[in-house]
Structure formats: C-alpha cells, structure tokens
Image (cartoon, rainbow, N blue to C red):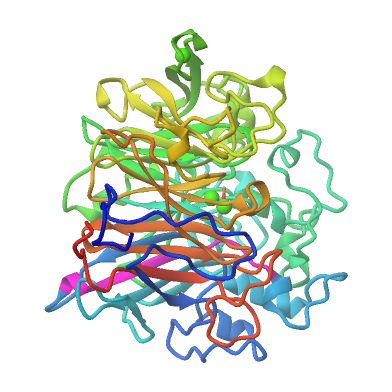
Amino acid sequence: AAPGRGKPTMAGFEPIAPTPNHVDDVVVPEGYAWTPVISWGDPVEPGAPDFDVHNQSVEAQKRQAGYNADYLALRRGGAGNNAANKGLLIFNNEYTNPELMFPDYDEANGPTAEQAAIEMAAHGMTIVEVRRQGQFAPWTYDRHGARNRRIHAWTPFHVDGPAAGAEWMRTSADPSGRTVLGTLNNCAGGETPWGTSLSGEENFNQYFNTTGTADPDGRLARYGIQSSGRGWERADGRFMVSSEPNEVNRFGWIVEVDADDPTSTPVKHTALGRFKHEGATIRIATDGRAVAYMGDDERYDYVYKFVSKGTYRKGDKAHNKTLLSEGDLYVARFDGDGLGDGEWDGTGVWLPLVVDGTSHVPGWSVAEVLTWTRQAADLVGPTKMDRPEDVEPNPHTGHVYLALTNNTSRRPAEIDEANPRASNKHGHIIEWREAGNDAAALEFSWRIVLLAGQPNDPTTYFNGFDRRLVSPISCPDNVAFDSEPDHLWISTDGAPGTLGTCDGMFLMPTDGPDKGKVQQFLSVPAGAECCGPVVEWTDRSVLICVQHPGDGLPSSYPYLGDPVPRPGVAHIYRPNGRGTGS
Ligand code: FEO
Ligand code: CA
Ligand code: CA
Ligand code: CA
C-alpha cells in the first residue's frame, strides 16, 4: 500500500523488496525521493574547476570532492537565520578505484606517476557547507562555503600521545616524528560531543611497497603490509618501505579533525593504538571521562576501548580536544555462558593494555604497545572476532552495538558463542551493556541481536522476531541511531556477493513489539556499498554515502551524464514531510 493508505508500518515506511544486484539505481520506499548532494570531483575549495573526467589533475583534485565516501556526518546549524536549514557535511574518502577513475587506465601496469598522485589527492576527507529550503527539502552543497575544505595525502597532521616522536615515527622528511603528511583509508568515524570529527585509518597497508624489506619481527606481516599493487611509490618515495622504513608506522591511527576551523591542523592520536581502525565513537563515562569504542577490521581481530585521563567539560572545546591525547587502552574478551539458555550471550571483560601510563604487556613499553597494538593484544588473550567494523553506543540507552561483517575463514573448531558460525559469510551484530551502564566500566554483559542472512536459512537470528517477516540482510558494516530510542539502522557492504542483491540500509528495532524486525529502507546502485548513514527521522531525512558504484557491475551513478560512475553523498527525503502514513 502507498504511504498513507492501508496499514502504516511501525516506522512510517513500506520496506522495499530486495534489489537484484545488477540494478543501477537508488531504490527508496514509496513516498520518498532522493538526490545526489555531492559527488567525486565536485568543486569544494576556491579555484576548483568543475569535474571533467577527461581533464583530471593533482591540483584540481586537491580542491575537489574526494573519492569513495564512507563516514558521513551532518553538523546542523549555522550563522544567522534559518540555522536548522544550514549545516556542515563531513565525509571520508576512504580509497580510490583507479580502473573506474581514469578512462585510459592501464590495468596491467598500474597507475602512472600522475595518476597515482591524483589518487593521493582523492583520498582523505571532504568538508562542505550545505543548506536546504525547508525541513522536508533536499540538502544542496555550497561550492563557496567558508568552511569548505579538502584534506588529502599531503595535508599536515600533528601527531600526539605517547608514541609521538618515538624513533620509529621519524623519517627523513620529519626528523621530529611529530608531523605526518596525509591520512589514508579513512573508513568509519564518529562525531565527538565537543564538536570534532573522528575517523579511522583502516587498510593503510595497501599503499606501501615492501619489496626488498626484511621483516624479522613480523611487524609488517601482522598488519598485512606487503608489496603493494598500488604503485604509489611512483608518485612519492615515502611509500617504498626499503627507503623510508618508518613512514608506514605513521598510519593506522585515529585522527581528529575540527571541521569548524578550516585552518586547524588535524591530529593523529597515538594513545588510541595503531591497527586497521574502522572508526571511533565516543560516550562520556559516569565520571566525565571520554570513552572511545573502536574495531580492528580484520578476520580474527579485536575490539578496543580507550578511556581518557581527563574529563569532559561542556562548552570548553579547547580542553576537550586534549582528551584523546592521554588515557587507558583496553581490548575485549567475550565469554559465553553456554547455548543451553537458547541465547548467544554472556559476560565480558576489558583487558588492560595501557593503564595510568603503564604498559600491562610484559616487556613492552607504552609507546610500543600503542604502535604495534595488534601484537601487544595477541599477548593478553582477547576474543578473535569476525571482522569488527562499526561499533557505536546508542545515545539514548548507552547500549553498544558492534557490526561484525563476516569471516568466511572461521573453521568449525574456531567458533565461540560470540562468533558462533563457521564460514560466517553474512555477519552478525552484538549488543553489550557496560556494568552499571558506565562507559568506563571494566566488565559488561553481551548478546547477539542479529545473525544475518537469508531468513529461511536456519542459522539466522533476528532478535527473536519471526524470520518469515523480515528483510534478507548480509554483511552489516555501519550502524546508526536516530531520535527514536530503539531505532538501530544498519548499512551493508557485501550483499551483491552473498545474497545476489544490492547493498542497502535497514532498520531493526532493538526493543518493543517489533524488536528484531529487519526492514529494508533503501538499496544502493550496482557495485556500490552503502555507508555512513545519517538519519534525522523527525525530518524523514536520510543521508548516505554511495561508495564504489560500478565496482564489478556497471553503474553510471549519480546519473548526470558522465562517462564514469562518481561515488558520493546522496540525500533521501520525503517531499511531503511526515505525511499521513507515519
Ligand atoms: Fe572500510 Fe571495515 O570497512
Ligand atoms: Ca548463552
Ligand atoms: Ca566499514
Ligand atoms: Ca566497507
């Protein structure tokens, strides 16, 4: 039934049917519309030319929107009247698909030096001012916004925390070990309560070429750093590990950007450890300390949390921007209580790695633990998870949700109650509650709330909801919340390969009569994954990133006549507002 007719669904939309994976469109529920807001190559900084796929240059790309958007934030408000209809859009540019970017790309030989440099300029982050004509109108971006900014692979970052300046952080270009050019492979992220943006440097390993480099301690191998096919050393010698061995240690961190000040120097926080950071999200503990939840997205890797030494002071941004510079780092162990109770659940503990400035890993200094965090964690016995992606606390309840996207390698002998499926190709979601609902607690209770897949697959689980009444879902990647306390939104990355359907975005209530009722809200174009959802449900407004459209299946997103697909940000809105169906 059309919205407003027949029986309204609990959230005011009729779920869409699964979209076959070759469909090249953004599919939204009846009554909704969508529009691209900004796409790869759109002008952002002063002097940027209009996008022209046949006239790309490094200097143009440094001023134009970056590629492959992932994390997305909308910071509402602005100067003057009508602040609710102004805002700042912040999104990560995780990586590049050169075979889709360059019409003359040579697959066999990789990028030319100039193409590699354009790719470097297309990485990082994009910040643009946006506005709309009213509560239910589409957002548009302002190419002349005063806070517009591109952060790319040459933008200087300040390094802080215990590993800053360590001998292994120094390079020929930066003998201090405290200034790094660029941020790479920024995946998910989070907005801090003090008005900055965090993001994770994830698969940074892929940019470095280790030809001719020994690895006696396995410090490169544990991070998957090996001879790269990217060819970036053609553009910048620092990506050749044999000639600049420490450059690789300067990536794999959580970065903090103050988007309100386009002249600010972003920071890499070594206190939060170095791994393939999916992202970081903040909750303030009972005593005011800032807690950051973080996943390390690799098969069999871990979930971490950081607890700041200092405490949050409302309204004191300068102070709060120091919170992630010093604190404690923990890694999670999930203990099952057995399947006799019919639930995948149990208790957990946060195992200390660094506490009060002291290493809890015998024989390792604090700076070593923070730089080779994976190996340090290996020594304290955390639970090996099925690729921990986004981990976010629900702002209404404090309960924490962790997307475990998949792990097809897990063998039957390796399953545990928190990772209960062998060959886990569809992934799952764990919810946990910190003891006393205090983010800084060192113990928690947990349960699986979703085992994804085709609902007729008996290994799936939808929080107890009738599996015949839910949408198929696979490979949860990002989670998000809105103004409703029990709304968990999930975006996916991998359904084309596992379900034969386009990736998309889903709503799953976590409490109430519809608890576990997964309903698909949208699907993204052929070849794309769906990232970064921002949901403002009172406005029936959803912003998403359409990442790598055309990867493996033809796409011409955003359908503006260009000969190549252009990843970017799309807005889904309900032109008539809430309507009568909600
Ligand atoms: Fe970039 Fe873990 O996804
Ligand atoms: Ca149990
Ligand atoms: Ca991700
Ligand atoms: Ca992803």
Q: Nearer the viewer, residue 51 or 486?
A: 486
Q: Is residue 469 visible?
A: yes
Residue 264 shows in this picture: no
Q: Is residue 87 magenta?
A: yes
Q: Report the front residue among 53 and 237.
A: 53
Residue at the image position 28 percent from the left and 50 percent from the top: 11
Magenta includes 325? no
Pinpoint residue 154: horizontal percent, then vertical percent: 57, 70
Residue 421's place in the image compared with 96, above or below, is above
The answer to whether residue 436 is above or below residue 182 is: above
The quarter of the image holding the N terminus is: bottom left
Pick whichever, 489 or 288, lies toward us: 489
Report the residue that reaches farthest toward the left.
Answer: 81
- Quadrant of the snapshot with the C terminus: bottom left
In the displayed structure image, the side of residue 289 where residue 156 appears, left or right: right
Viewed as shown, does residue 440 lie left or right of 272?
Answer: left
Q: Quadrant of residue 409?
A: top right
User: So how many labels did they put on this image?
Assistant: 0
Query: Foreground residue, 3 or 81?
Result: 3
Q: Residue at x 26, y 56 (%)?
A: 6
Image spot of residue 324 (x, y percent)? 37, 44
Residue 298 in the image, given as x and y percentages of width and height: 63, 39
State the residue at coordinates (53%, 37%).
455
Which residues are the magenta region?
A: 83-97
Residue 32, relative to residue 331: is it above or below? below
Residue 53: percent from left, percent from top: 64, 86
